[in-house]
Amino acid sequence: MESVKRFITAKLKLKVNESKSAVAKPQERKFLGFSFTSGKELKRKIAPKAIDRFKERVREITRKSKGKSMEKMVEELARYLRGWRGYFGFCETPSMLKGLDSWIRRRVRSAFWRQWKTGRKRYAELVRRGVSGTEAAKTASSRRGPWRVSQSPTLDRALSNAYLASLGLPSLVGGR
């Protein structure tokens, strides 16, 4: 490290940031939001800190006290996701992107559920979106919280991935 630092400062006339510079294995370092997997074959993956920042931003966009229509919320979220995918979309760990994609969709379904507020409104919205009356009544009268209900097959059918895509919500996986 010392010889490299001497070369950079003396020959190239550059400053070396001691806190960011190190000699270590690729798995132990991160660079521009990326890190590497361990094992025989190194693959680019998204650094944990970048994922935490991403989730925090999605939570901020979809939080309940925003006071925006769902169309505006999905539009703002779509703009953020397209930019994020443009930067991190070429990581070599697609399972991570699939997990984040399903988490985002569950977060959006939860936001819809919170916006509908009352059991009567929830029932009406579920029936309007093609869910049978008995299933809609069961789900609408559920005492579970929005995050738990967002995982239910009934809400998944009412707010399918195709419906969310028709609202303009892009996927992190694939070319959509």
Image (tube, helix red, strand yellow):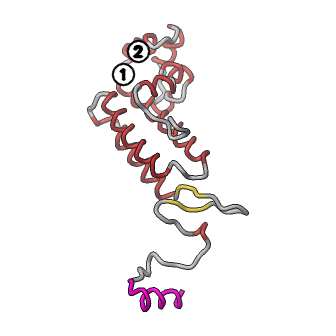
Q: Is residue 1 above or below residue 79?
A: below
The structure residue drawn at horizontal position 47% and vertical position 91%, both measured from the top left corner, is 6
Q: Tag count in the figure?
A: 2
Give percent across and percent down for residue 152.
55, 25
Q: Is residue 167 above or below residue 37?
A: above
Classify the position of the N terminus by image quarter: bottom right
Q: Is residue 50 magenta?
A: no
Q: Is residue 3 magenta?
A: yes
Q: Which residue in the structure is indicated by mark 1?
A: 116
Question: SS at mark 1?
Answer: helix
Judged left or right of residue 120, residue 134 is right
Question: SS at mark 2?
Answer: helix
**Cα gap from disc 2 to disc 1, whole angstroms:** 8 Å
**Which of the two residues, 122 or 28, is positioned nearer the viewer here?**
28
Question: Where does the magenta region start and end?
Answer: 1-14
The residue lying furthest to the left in this view is 67
Q: Badge 2: how crowded within 10 Å, few (<14), some, or many (20+)?
A: some
Amino acid type for the residue under numbered disc 1: Trp
Q: Which residue in the structure is indicated by mark 2?
A: 125
**Which of the two residues, 149 or 170, is positioned nearer the viewer here?**
170
The structure residue drawn at horizontal position 54% and vertical position 69%, both measured from the top left corner, is 29
* Circles 2 and 1 in contact, beta carbons < 8 Å: yes
Give percent across and percent down for residue 65.
29, 36
Q: Badge 1: how crowded within 10 Å, few (<14), some, or many (20+)?
A: some
Judged left or right of residue 109, residue 94 is right
The structure residue drawn at horizontal position 46% and vertical position 56%, both measured from the top left corner, is 50
**Which of the two residues, 101 or 143, is positioned nearer the viewer here?**
101
